Amino acid sequence: MLNVADIRRQVERAIETDSVIKKGLQQRIINSRALDRYILEANGVDSTLDAILGIVRRYPLCSENE
């Protein structure tokens, strides 16, 4: 199992490389639990859903204009 920093980087990279996910998070229209499952399955992150959820909830949501 990876350490917390590596998992955080994987989750943040998954968000940052998908503009639809990033914009949806900024607009608060994405279901966090569904996104967690998607990241876990699509990106093969070696972690638990709860750990990914914590990372997603702490992801900085500032808009690109700021």
Image (cartoon, rainbow, N blue to C red):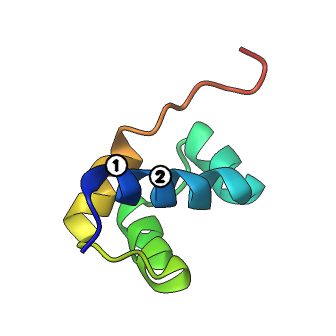
Report if the CB atoms under discs 2 and 1 are less than 8 Å apart: yes
Labels in figure, total = 2
Which label belongs to residue 32? none
Q: Residue at x 40, y 68 (%)?
A: 36
Q: Is residue 27 visible?
A: no
Above or below, 44 against 13 in this view is: below
Q: Secondary structure at mark 2?
A: helix
What amino acid type should be assigned to the residue bearing mark 1? Ala
Above or below, 60 against 22 in this view is: above
Reading the image, the residue beneath label 2 is 9
Q: Position of residue 53 (x, y in %)?
A: 30, 57
Q: With 6 as the anchor, is 14 left or right in this view?
A: right
Q: Residue at x 49, y 31 (%)?
A: 60
Q: Is residue 55 visible?
A: yes
**Residue furthest out toward the top:** 66
Reading the image, the residue beneath label 1 is 5
Q: Position of residue 15 (x, y in %)?
A: 59, 55
Above or below, 32 against 48 in this view is: above
Quadrant location, the C terminus? top right
Q: Between residue 64 and residue 2, name the one nearer to us.
A: 2
Q: With 18 as the anchor, is 14 left or right in this view?
A: left
Q: With 52 as the anchor, is 14 left or right in this view?
A: right
Q: Position of residue 3 (x, y in %)?
A: 26, 59
Q: Position of residue 35 (x, y in %)?
A: 47, 67
Q: With 22 as the anchor, is 45 left or right in this view?
A: left
- Tell me where residue 20 sits by quadrant: bottom right
The Cα–Cα distance between marks 2 and 1, rounded to whole angstroms, is: 6 Å
Q: Secondary structure at mark 1?
A: helix
Q: Between residue 57 and residue 10, name the one nearer to us.
A: 10
What amino acid type should be assigned to the residue bearing mark 2? Arg
Q: Residue at x 78, y 19 (%)?
A: 65
